C-alpha cells in the first residue's frame, strides 16, 4: 500500500504517541457489556480506566461505537447521498416503503441545507442526540459534494455534534484527507470479503474511473480500495468500524478471515450483521432464496471473532434517514414539511445539562451492577444462558411486554451479564407470517432465552410464555437491567443447586426480516 | 441516436448526473432525463455510456431509437 506517503500532510499526533494509541486500540477487547470480567471496556463500566482518554472521549456518547452508550444516546442519519458506485446483491434501490427498515431505504432525499436544518431541529427536540451520520441511501463518498457540504454546515451551526459516515470504501482513499479535515472521527466501512472470488458472489459490479467492472475483477478492485482506505484512516487516528453482512454459504466462514484482516489494519470495532433477505425486497439474494443466518449462527460467529477484537452486537441495521435511539425510529416526526415549519432554538447549554444528567444515570447503573455482581462472587457454575429484556432505553427494564418492538438479549453466567444482541418483534411488513398470532412471533424470536424481563405483562401472554418454557419476570420493573439480571441468575443457580429446578438448554431463535420503524 | 432514461424505473438516485460528460442529464419532476440534443452516447469521451454504466437499475438508461445515430464530428 502506498498510503504511508500520503499521511504526512494530515494533522495527526506525533508518531510515537499515535502508535501507542493504535496499540492500545488493537489490544483492547470486548466492546460489549462485559459485566463480570472486572475489566471495563468501551462498552461497559466507566470505560475511562482502560481506554486512552482520547479514545474514550470519542466513543463514550456514540451509540454505534459503544454498546453501553446506545442505551442512553441517540443518533440520526441524513439522506443526502442517493448515488452509489457499486451494486450489492442484498440491496435494491427501487424498493421504498415507509414501513421498511434496511440500509439503502429512505422516504425522502434531502439537500445539504435541508439536512442541516433537520439536524438542528432534531438536536433541539432530542437533547441526547449526539451523533450525525451520513450513510446513504447510496454511498456518501459517491456524493462527495453533498456529503461534505452537509458536514460543513453542521460543523458551523452545531459544533457539539459528532460527525460520522458509512461507506462501501471504493472511493475512500480519494477522500481520507477531506474526512480528516472535517474532524470526522468515526468512519464505518462495509467489508464483506477479502477474497475476490467470494466478492464476485456478493457484488455484480463496481463503477470506478468511468468504467463498470464486473466479476472477480470488480471484487478485487473493491477489496484493495477498502483495505487501503482502512489503513489510511487508522494511520490518522480516525476510529474505524467494519460492518460485514453475514451471508450463510457465501461468506459466513470467510468472515473470520475478514476479521483478522481488518484487525491487523487497526479497525476498532467489527459489526457482523445478519443478511436481511426476503423475496418482496426485490434484491438478488431475496429473489434467489438466499437465507439469512439464525440467531445461534450469528452469535457463534460473533463469539468466534470476539477473541480477536471488539464486536458490535447492538446494530439495528437502520435506515439511511433513521432518527432516535438505536431500536427506535422517530424519523416520521421530522419530515421535511415538519422541520421547515419548526422554529428551532439551538441551545448548546441545555443540551449539555441534559447530557450531564444522562451521565449520572450511567454511573448509578454501573454502581448497581457492580454491587450485585459482588454478591455472585464465590459462585461457580458452568451454566450460561440467555435472557430477553423489554426496554425503552436508559438501561432500565421499563417496557411493557405487549408494547415491545424489540427485546435486548443478555448472556448470563457467573461472570455477570453481557449484552449479546437484540431481536425485533414488531409486526409491520412482516413478510411470510400474515395474520399469525403476534405472540408466536415473539416466542420464535426469543426462543433461545430462559426468561424475559418486562415492566408489565398480561395474564394470557404470561401463561403462553411459561408453556413455551420462557419464564416471564416482572418483579424487577423499572430497575436496572444488568443488576436485575444478575440477581435473577443468582436465584436461578440457587434453585438448580437445591434441585428445585433442572437446567435445560434452549433451542435456536429466528432473526426477523421485516421493518423496525415508527409506523406503529 | 441518444440514450434515454425509462422514467418508471428511475430511482432518482442522481448517480448519472455528474458522470455525463455532456451535462445532458437533469432532474425533472422527480426523475432524471437526458437532453437528446446534448447526448453523444459518450462517444469520444469514454468507452461506454456513463449513465448506463453507473445506473443501479438494469435496462433503465437505454438507447433511444427514435433519434438518429449520433455522428461524431470528423
Image (cartoon, grey):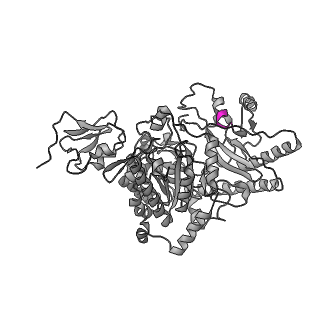
Q: Main secondary structure of the magenta part?
A: helix
Q: What stretch of residues is rendered in magenta?
A: A442-447
- Specify whether B71 is left or right of A252: left
Residue at (27, 37) in percent of width and height = B62
Give the percent coordinates (x, y) of residue A348.
52, 58
Above/below status of A291 relative to A229:
above
Residue A462 appears at what percent x and percent y? 74, 31
Q: Does residue A196 show up?
A: yes
Residue B47 vs residue A480, the one in the foreground? B47
Tell me what residue is drawn at x 35 percent, y 38 percent: B58
- Give percent across and percent down for residue A381: 81, 50
Q: Is residue A450 left or right of residue A273?
A: right
Residue A422 higher or lower than A130, as above or below = above
Q: Quadrant of the C terminus of chain A?
A: top right
Q: For this view, does A148 lie left or right of residue B70?
A: right
Q: Can residue A71 be seen here?
A: no
Amino acid at each position: 500500500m502506498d498510503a504511508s506517503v500520503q499521511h504526512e500532510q494530515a494533522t495527526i499526533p506525533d508518531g510515537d504517541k499515535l502508535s501507542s494509541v493504535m496499540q492500545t486500540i488493537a489490544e483492547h477487547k470486548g466492546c460489549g457489556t462485559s459485566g463480570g470480567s472486572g475489566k471495563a471496556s468501551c462498552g461497559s463500566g466507566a470505560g475511562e480506566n482502560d481506554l486512552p482518554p482520547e479514545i474514550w472521549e470519542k466513543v463514550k456518547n456514540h451509540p454505534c461505537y459503544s454498546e453501553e452508550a446506545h442505551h442512553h444516546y441517540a443518533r440520526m442519519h441524513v439522506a443526502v447521498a442517493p448515488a452509489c458506485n457499486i451494486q450489492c446483491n442484498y440491496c435494491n434501490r427501487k424498493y421504498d416503503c415507509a414501513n421498511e427498515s434496511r440500509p439503502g431505504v429512505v422516504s425522502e432525499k434531502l439537500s445539504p441545507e435541508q439536512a442541516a436544518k433537520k439536524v438542528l431541529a432534531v438536536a433541539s427536540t432530542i437533547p441526547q442526540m449526539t451523533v450525525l451520520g451520513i450513510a446513504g441511501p447510496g454511498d456518501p463518498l459517491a456524493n462527495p459534494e453533498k456529503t461534505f457540504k452537509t458536514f460543513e454546515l453542521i460543523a458551523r451551526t452545531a459544533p457539539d455534534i459528532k460527525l460520522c459516515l458509512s461507506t462501501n470504501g471504493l472511493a475512500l482513499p480519494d477522500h481520507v484527507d477531506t474526512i480528516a479535515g472535517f474532524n470526522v472521527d468515526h468512519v464505518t466501512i462495509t467489508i464483506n470479503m477479502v477474497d475476490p472470488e467470494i466478492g464476485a458472489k456478493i457484488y455484480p459490479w463496481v463503477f470506478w474511473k468511468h468504467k463498470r467492472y464486473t466479476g472477480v475483477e470488480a471484487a478485487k478492485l473493491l477489496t484493495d480500495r477498502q483495505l487501503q482506505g482502512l489503513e489510511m484512516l487508522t494511520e490518522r487516528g480516525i476510529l474505524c468500524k467494519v460492518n460485514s453482512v453475514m451471508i450463510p454459504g457465501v461468506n459466513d466462514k470467510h468472515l473470520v478471515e475478514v476479521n483478522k484482516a481488518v484487525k491487523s489494519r487497526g479497525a476498532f470495532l467489527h459489526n457482523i450483521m445478519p443478511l436481511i433477505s426476503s423475496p418482496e425486497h426485490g434484491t438478488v439474494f431475496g429473489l434467489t432464496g438466499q437465507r439469512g443466518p439464525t440467531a445461534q449462527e450469528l452469535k457463534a460467529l460473533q463469539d468466534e471473532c470476539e477473541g480477536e477484537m471488539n464486536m458490535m452486537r447492538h446494530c439495528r441495521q437502520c435506515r439511511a434517514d433513521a432518527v432516535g435511539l438505536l431500536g427506535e425510529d422517530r424519523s416520521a416526526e421530522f419530515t421535511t414539511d415538519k422541520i421547515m415549519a419548526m422554529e428551532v432554538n439551538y441551545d448548546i447549554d441545555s443540551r449539555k445539562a441534559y447530557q450531564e444528567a444522562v451521565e449520572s444515570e450511567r454511573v448509578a447503573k454501573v454502581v448497581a451492577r457492580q454491587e450485585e455482581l459482588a454478591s455472585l462472587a464465590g459462585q461457580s457454575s458452568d451454566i450460561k444462558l440467555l435472557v430477553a429484556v423489554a426496554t425503552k432505553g436508559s438501561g432500565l427494564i421499563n417496557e411493557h411486554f405487549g408494547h415491545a418492538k424489540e427485546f435486548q438479549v443478555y448472556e448470563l453466567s457467573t461472570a455477570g451479564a453481557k449484552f449479546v444482541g437484540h431481536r425485533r418483534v414488531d409486526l409491520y411488513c412482516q413478510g411470510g407470517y400474515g395474520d399469525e398470532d403476534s405472540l408466536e412471533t415473539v416466542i420464535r424470536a426469543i426462543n433461545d432465552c430462559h426468561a424475559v424481563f418486562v415492566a408489565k405483562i398480561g395474564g394470557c401472554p404470561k401463561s403462553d410464555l411459561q408453556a413455551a418454557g420462557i419464564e416471564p419476570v416482572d418483579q424487577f420493573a423499572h430497575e436496572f437491567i444488568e443488576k436485575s439480571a444478575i440477581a435473577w441468575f443468582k436465584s436461578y443457580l440457587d434453585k438448580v443447586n437445591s434441585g428445585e429446578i433442572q437446567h435445560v438448554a434452549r433451542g435456536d431463535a429466528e432473526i426477523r426480516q421485516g421493518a423496525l420503524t415508527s409506523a406503529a | 441516436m441518444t440514450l434515454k432514461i425509462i422514467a418508471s424505473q428511475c430511482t432518482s438516485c442522481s448517480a448519472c448526473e455528474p458522470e455525463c460528460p455532456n451535462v445532458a442529464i437533469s432532474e425533472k419532476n422527480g426523475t432524471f432525463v437526458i437532453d437528446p440534443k446534448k447526448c453523444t452516447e459518450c462517444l469520444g469521451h469514454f468507452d461506454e455510456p456513463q449513465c448506463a454504466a453507473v445506473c443501479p437499475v438494469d435496462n433503465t438508461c437505454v438507447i433511444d431509437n427514435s433519434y438518429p445515430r449520433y455522428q461524431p464530428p470528423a
